[in-house]
């Protein structure tokens, strides 16, 4: 059996880092971990190829070669997915599909996909493969259960060129104990976090290490600390492995704000090599936090929590939302002040959107407030429901927030505040591509940049090399990232 796995293209969004990639000589930010993992579940005697449209073109010859095309994608990749399906139909190619997009709206694809493998592949892919072998494969495979991750195979890294990517990825757990109204994670993976065995995780690190990778690894859990006790049991093994291998990786992940409450957990993560964590901070408005059931953020000093993490050696990336029912027009200035005070440089601010099958989606549907399908990109300035605030005021206020926080002056202020607090634990290795990126930043940002961005680039250059030499690399990297964020903000 010949299988072509196709990863759809991401549009130019906040997390695509497309304006950063040219600085670091990479084609894409992250590899298609889901498809690589599914590839590990397929029979070893099958002939597999993978095409990632973020780094290469999909040729008609590739499609004609395959017995089946396997596609997985997210909502934000829907446009590319639809284009792939159209090409496959034109060439009479059979399609197998699964992943978050198809789980969110399977009815949209019933007529154009030969086989939909929904929910988690550990449960739904094996019966499909057995039926396919027996010539009785059904159109749709579903499961209401959540699998134990001990059966999850090693990803098939041999199918891609890892040097094309800015970071590699592994997954430790699925599920989140919290149940935020707007989030689709619990709908997809449940509220009981399921973790891989420690030996599995170490084996994944070994494989990546054996490939020659010595750079950033993104642990893609939606909440890495969802089960604190189990994570505390895993981290000492990671620490020992990292020490034995001379700290080859820098880890980043996603976690909830209650990480700041656990000094032991913070220390274990930092010792294991974590230096970056994304946290859904959402809003300084406590009424809105309660509205969306973001209870872990309520009634706490989030700025102090962020500062604590920064001082412990963790750079915090933040997610923020405007457009809750309890937001009034003061939220825009409050959100700007919240972001600036926290020193969170990478601040993703989005308009609230109702993702399919979330509690928010069901509530708004019941109230007849849903008006559109979501684009999957909550930073494109669109909204798919009728908000309580005047729509024009909401969209204009959102645009003002984004353009303000990514203005050169506000970026400089946030990077400065971050550097004042940040205490990196160890000197990080500098790669050749990072040296090239730094030289390119001098040319493109320091010489060709416009007046204000030019001025603040050189001001940050001087400040970091004089007063924060230990974090000079981080400071310059953030200035490059903010160039990308500013470009994205210009399109809102």
Image (cartoon, grey):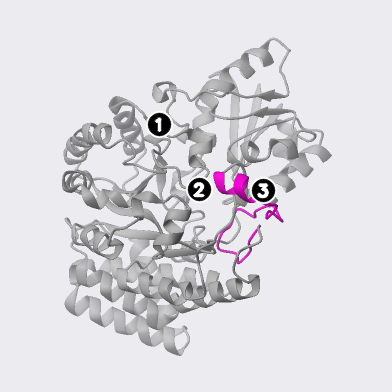
- Separation of disc 3 and disc 1 at Cα? 27 Å
Nearest to viewer (mark 1 / mark 2): 2
- 320 versus 414 height, above or below: above
Question: Residue at horizontal 43%, vertical 75%?
Answer: 405
**Sequence-wise, which precedes: disc 3 or disc 1?**
1
Q: Which residue is mark 1?
A: 192
The answer to whether residue 368 is magenta is yes
Is 353 placed above or below 98 here? below
How packed mark 1 is, by other alpha carbons closer than 10 Å (few <14, some 14-19, many 20 or more), is some
Give percent across and percent down for residue 469: 19, 71
* Dominant SS in magenta: loop
Residue at the disc numbered 3 = 365
Name the residue nearer the viewer: 490 or 359.
Answer: 359
- Seen as rendered, the residue at the extreme top is 134
Q: Which residue is mark 2?
A: 181
Q: Residue at the location (31% across, 35% down)?
A: 227
Can you say whether 418 is above or below 213 in the image? below
- Quarter of the image holding residue 298? bottom left
SS class, disc 1: loop
Crowding at dot 3, Cα within 10 Å, few <14 / some 14-19 / many 20+, comes out as some
Image coordinates of residue 414 in percent, x first then y, are 33, 74
Residue occupying image coordinates x 35% and y 54%: 297
The residue that appears at 48% across and 50% down in the rendered structure is 164
The residue closer to the viewer here, 88 or 382, is 382
């Amino acid at each position: 059996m010949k299988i072509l796995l196709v990863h759809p293209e991401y549009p130019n969004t906040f997390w695509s880092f497309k304006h950063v990639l040219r600085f670091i000589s990479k084609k894409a930010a992250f590899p298609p971990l889901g498809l690589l993992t599914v590839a590990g579940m397929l029979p070893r005697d099958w002939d597999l190829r993978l095409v990632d449209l973020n780094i290469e073109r999909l040729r008609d010859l590739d499609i004609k070669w395959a017995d089946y095309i396997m596609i997985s994608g997210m909502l934000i990749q829907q446009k590319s997915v639809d284009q792939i399906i159209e090409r496959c139909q034109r060439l009479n190619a059979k399609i197998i599909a699964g992943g978050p997009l198809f789980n969110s709206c399977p009815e949209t694809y019933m007529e154009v996909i030969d086989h939909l493998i929904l929910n988690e592949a550990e449960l739904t892919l094996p019966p499909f493969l057995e039926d396919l072998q027996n010539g009785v494969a059904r159109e749709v495979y579903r499961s209401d259960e959540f699998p134990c991750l001990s059966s999850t195979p090693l990803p098939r890294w041999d199918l891609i060129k890892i040097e094309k990517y800015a970071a590699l990825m592994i997954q430790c757990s699925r599920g989140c104990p919290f149940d935020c109204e707007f989030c689709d994670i619990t709908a997809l993976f449940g509220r009981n976090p399921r973790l891989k065995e420690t030996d599995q995780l170490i084996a994944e690190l070994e494989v990546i290490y054996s490939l020659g990778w010595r750079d950033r690894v993104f642990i893609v859990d939606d909440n890495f600390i969802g089960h604190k006790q189990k994570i505390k049991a895993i981290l000492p093994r990671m620490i020992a492995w990292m020490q034995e291998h001379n700290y080859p990786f820098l880890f980043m992940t996603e976690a909830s704000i209650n990480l700041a409450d656990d000094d032991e957990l913070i220390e274990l993560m930092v010792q294991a090599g974590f230096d970056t964590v994304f946290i859904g901070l959402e809003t300084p408005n406590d009424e809105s936090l309660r509205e969306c059931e973001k209870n872990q953020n309520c009634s706490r000093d989030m700025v102090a929590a962020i500062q604590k993490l920064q001082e412990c050696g963790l750079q915090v990336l933040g997610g923020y939302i405007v457009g809750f029912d309890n937001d009034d027009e003061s939220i825009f200035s409050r959100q700007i002040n919240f972001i600036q005070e926290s020193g969170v440089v990478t601040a993703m601010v989005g308009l609230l959107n109702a993702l399919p099958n979330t509690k928010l989606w069901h509530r708004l549907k019941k109230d007849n407030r849903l008006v559109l399908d979501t684009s999957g990109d909550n930073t494109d300035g669109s909204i798919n429901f009728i908000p309580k605030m005047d729509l024009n005021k909401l969209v204009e206020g959102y645009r003002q927030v984004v353009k303000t926080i990514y203005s050169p002056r506000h970026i400089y202020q946030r990077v400065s505040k971050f550097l004042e607090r940040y205490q990196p634990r160890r000197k990080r290795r500098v790669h050749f591509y990072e040296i090239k990126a730094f030289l390119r930043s001098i040319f493109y940002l320091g010489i060709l940049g416009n007046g204000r961005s030019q001025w603040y680039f050189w001001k940050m250059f001087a400040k970091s090399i004089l007063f924060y030499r230990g974090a000079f690399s981080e400071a310059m990297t953030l200035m490059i990232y903010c160039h990308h964020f500013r470009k994205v903000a210009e399109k809102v």
